[in-house]
Amino acid sequence: MKIFVFKDGKTKGPFSKDEILADIKMGRLKSDDQICTDGKNWILIRDSGIINFQTRSLLFWKIGVISLFFVFIVGAICIALLLYFGGYFSDEEVHENITDSQDNNFSDIRDLDYFEWESHPDDSFKNGAALVISSSGKVRYQLQGNPKSDYVEIGQVLTQGTRLITEDNGEAIILFTNGTSMSVGNNANFLITSFGQKEFQSDEGLISSLNNELSPSRIKLNLDLGELVVVVKKLNKQSSFLVQSELGFAGVRGTSFAINSKSGLTSVNVISGEVDFLNSDNQSKLVGENHMIQSDGNKLSYKRDVPRSEISRIILMEKEAKNAAKDISVSKIKNYFDRLNLSFGSCDPIERERRFLISGGTDEIKSAIHKGLDWLDMMQTSDGSWGANDRDDKGNLKPSNSIAMSGMAVICFLQNCELDLATKRGLALENGVEYLSKVSISKVKSQRDSYAHPIFARAVVMAYQRMKREDIHDLAKKTISMIIDGQNENGGWAYAYGKGTVAHVDLSVTGWNLMALLEAHSIELQVDRLPDAIDRAMEYVKKCQDKNGMFA
């Protein structure tokens, strides 16, 4: 057994058990001195199980009183040991950095193959992402290949290849779709280099109740500057979480730690669990709980105790990350995950371009569409709705029906396949659907309601299908059922969904309601009497056509 001693701020060794016993008898070591017997953890001598220190110490003093000869023998042994280990107390053998230390043999023991794992080794690994769940001060994000950056919003999704930058007063909390949360300090700059994750099941449980990650994942971040405090759920054996800096890699398997990168120095402080650290010279070290390690590019410096001030600060950042994520459900994370991994379908970019050109599309038309969507994004209010900022033809503020306007705006974004959560338009769509999902449905009582409700219903149905929003499935069915219930006996729809021959049934109201039913039918939404309602509506529309082919 090789034993190392930490005394007077220095690590000494290795020693055998007998040598340690001899130093104890000579009073060089005390019961509250620390030793390491397994190459990882430091413990007090009295807790090590090597000897019963108090009993041996008492026996030693009794023997010392009885036999001076025994003292001479022990002294001779100690002198011999000192001569044998020549330079025991010299500065050349005492070490505080692991470059010269014999107590680790790091690189020869640890299996660090997972540092080289691919993020998407096969088709079972989909795209994972990080969600901004809290931010303060100035926090910006930059998409891959885009020299410009924009300020983040709550709900911003950071996908593979996205960079996050916090300024002097900027801080952010990130939640990864595997359940890991991370607090980002000020003046930080990091890149999500890669993030692959397997499918997982949705449920109504909270992220905070999970001990293990949601599914196997492989995350790699590149930290250029600043501090990250990471709370990693226990990882699957197929999983890895790596943070790379200029001077080394930190790899974890389920732990809480902080990594800080600044000019010429990278440090890792471990609060719980263990972190593998590998520097640029391929020196590695397993850093245990309450330990820290630093790399300056030339050597690794290992310390047993993280300073109390650092522990307090890191624990506070860790607590903030946990609190920000505590009320987020697994189903919400699943929704974001599914949105990132949609099958293209009608949004296949090649097929969309083909349809656009066949229909007479030009660059001028495409530019007009993009300008219109950017204007919609600009006009959206903070609660995700549209309509509050509408104006009349003289420029005077004239708010309009927020349900109808929000529904039409959402339809516009959906029709143009703005499904990428990492873009401003994708985030506008997400916020718009969130607003619609919270609308309190009431009975259609007015002329305006007769138009607003079917627009709202169609937007919800489209969002349910294209965005894979299982959470609005019941809402989609309810809105369509209301349209079917409101159909007039003649097959059309009237203002306020009136009934009988006296109701004001017209083709305009009928058209909006019929489009919503057709949208639901196209995705095979299961609603009672839906096919029959469509057939009756089509019969009404045919009756509205005159002999010249016009409708009125």
Image (cartoon, helix red, strand yellow):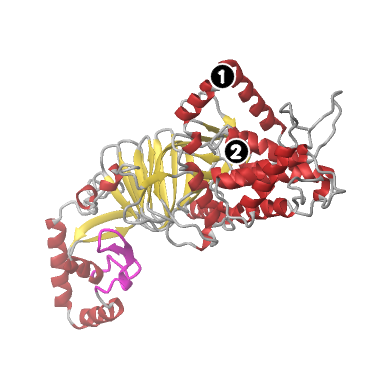
Q: Position of residue 362 (x, y in %)?
A: 56, 17
Q: Main secondary structure of the magenta part?
A: loop
Closest to the observer, 515 or 221: 515
Quadrant of the image occupied by residue 67: bottom left
- The spot of residue 203 in percent (x, y) is 51, 60
Give the CA distance from mark 1 to mark 2: 29 Å
**Pointer 2 residue:** 427
Residue appearing at x 12%, y 57% in the figure: 84
Q: Is residue 138 left or right of residue 75?
A: right
The residue carrying pointer 1 sits among few (fewer than 14), some (14 to 19) or many (20 or more) residues within 10 Å by Cα, namely few
Q: Residue furthest front?
A: 547
Residue in the image at 81% along x and 43% along y:
505
Label 1 SS: loop
Q: What residue is pinned by disc 1?
A: 360
Q: Quadrant of residue 426?
A: top right
Would you say residue 133 sits in the magenta stretch?
Answer: no
Near-viewer residue (378 or 55): 378
Q: Which residues are magenta?
A: 26-50
For the N terminus, give its image quadrant: bottom left
